[in-house]
Amino acid sequence: MSALTAQRRRADLQTLADRREPLDVLVIGGGVTGCGAALDAASRGLSVALVEAHDLAFGTSRWSSKLVHGGLRYLASASVGIAYESAIERHHLMTTIAPHLVSPLRQVVPDFGERRTKQLVWTGFRAGDALRRVARTPKSVLPGPGNLSVEEMATVTPTVARAGLRGGVGTYDGQLIDDARLVVGIARTAAAFGAHICTYTKASKVSGAGATLTDSLTGESFDISARSVINATGVWAGDVDSTLTIRPSRGTHLVFDAAAFGNPTAALTVPVAGSISRFVFAMPEQLGRVYLGLTDVDAPGAIPDVPDADDEEIDFLLDTVNVALRQPLTRSDIRGTYSGLRPLIDGAGGDGGSLADVSRKHAVRVNDSTLVSIVGGKLTTYRRMAQDAVDAAVKAAGLQSGSCITTSTPLIGATGGAVRRGLPASLVARFGTESARVLDSASIPDATASIANGIDVTRAEVEYAVTHEGALSADDVIERRTRIGLVPDDAARVRQAVEDVVAAAS
């Protein structure tokens, strides 16, 4: 059974408290990698529990660009291995694991007559298409690159500057409808394989043999023993294993109404001055928004639960994209901001060297015999990271398990028959084959009505977040099961209605 509810959470915690035999695997961290590890381990037939101090996708996993990268940017820095791995994992996501959540996004770079820039971009796009072919992703899933006329550029990115515009170059990459929805889908699929998914549960006194778990909602604590423990806490990994050195990097996005960019149908992609591998993307997103990102800056010091953008990052993003726009955007156009911390492995020894020296590749570290930490990496390659972590746990603890099957395991919503005709496109994009079930299982009045005027999230989706997706509060719904919270004004507008539905469904 895949439904996550408050009742199931309480039952799972009680089962763990009463358990006499050690778990095979205890996973700490409910982001994309931790949930991926729980799914991988459970689908191998191992006994698994995942604990998360907050909600699913509370940390870095909800602050991404919502892109499933094919590895193009890594080719520019000669990181061929990472680029290949990204293309392979993108293939799995788009063809088997989550095709309902990932769709092709056209990315277009305007041509303002700078011949060298166009040649570099075209060469990069051709190399990216070669990666697509190597990964065996068909063009029907991810079309290849091509040139655009001036008229085509103006059609797909209406606010692009016309002065000196000679057309553009475009290609396609994968785009998630929402990163947090991916995490919830993985967690629910893990639950269907028998994993215990326990949010708002803190792990302390962690070792390779278990931890003390505390229910944040009741304050009750108990000890849990495990044959292996996987530390998938991202930028907080050093709090669990003090031998790790993590160098956080902050990536910031700005949120706009799509109308500010003329309601684009492609991502306007602008090269960052002085770089051959970095771009700023203005990406059309759900709920009538455009996300503009992203930055890559050091984030030393204490790690906040919710990072904030600084003024320099906001100015950098605006200044970079405005080079390619007819009418410059200003701070008054911004509807919201969000920032995430990348858990990079410090290859520079923490000496303040360039972020270019910090590895984007993931690594598995084993300490205390069976404490496995998975660090580094990125959202696109979460499945491979999870597989490597579980492989290490199985080896370190001498566990008897089946083989990894996650490349061929679709998530909840990816299978189950054809999508019913006549359903709202936004609902299908977020739920796939579960779309009809969201509406059919609703018990609240006016289930198909929007939660607020102008926001295409139905009341039924809010109820479903509580009855099937593990949401325990209005914040869980507003900030993570939907992304209404990315615009603070919208969050304030829907809060009372969401609280009413959550209370009725709980």
Image (cartoon, rainbow, N blue to C red):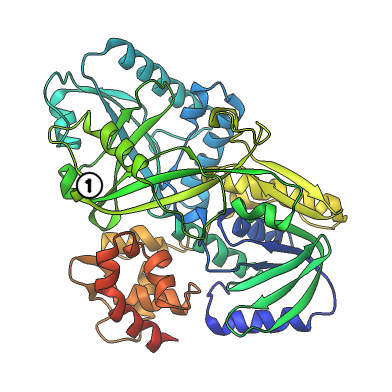
Q: Is residue 221 above or below residue 123?
A: below
* Quarter holding residue 172: top left
Viewport quadrant of the N terminus = bottom right
> 176 and 159: which one is in front?
159
Q: Is residue 37 above or below residue 188?
A: above
> 40 and 475: which one is in front?
475
Quick one: SS at disc 1? helix
Report whether residue 422 is seen.
no
Q: Is residue 85 above or below residue 394?
A: above
Q: Residue at x 12, y 27 (%)?
A: 151
For mark 1, what is the residue? 331
Q: Is residue 82 left or right of residue 500?
A: right
Q: Position of residue 358 (x, y in %)?
A: 60, 33
Q: Is residue 186 above or below residue 174?
A: below
> 343 and 393: which one is in front?
343
What amino acid is at disc 1?
Arg
Q: Position of residue 62 (x, y in %)?
A: 46, 56
- Residue sitting at the far top: 115
Q: Residue at x 25, y 65 (%)?
A: 489
Q: Residue at x 37, y 28 (%)?
A: 144
Q: Is residue 491 left or right of residue 366?
A: left
Q: Residue at x 66, y 69 (%)?
A: 195
* Quarter holding residue 36: bottom right
Q: How many marks?
A: 1
Report whether residue 339 is seen.
yes
- Mark 1, Cα crowd under 10 Å, few <14 / some 14-19 / many 20+, is few
> 216 and 19: which one is in front?
216
Viewport quadrant of the C terminus = bottom left
Q: Position of residue 254 (x, y in %)?
A: 31, 48
Q: Position of residue 6 (x, y in %)?
A: 54, 82
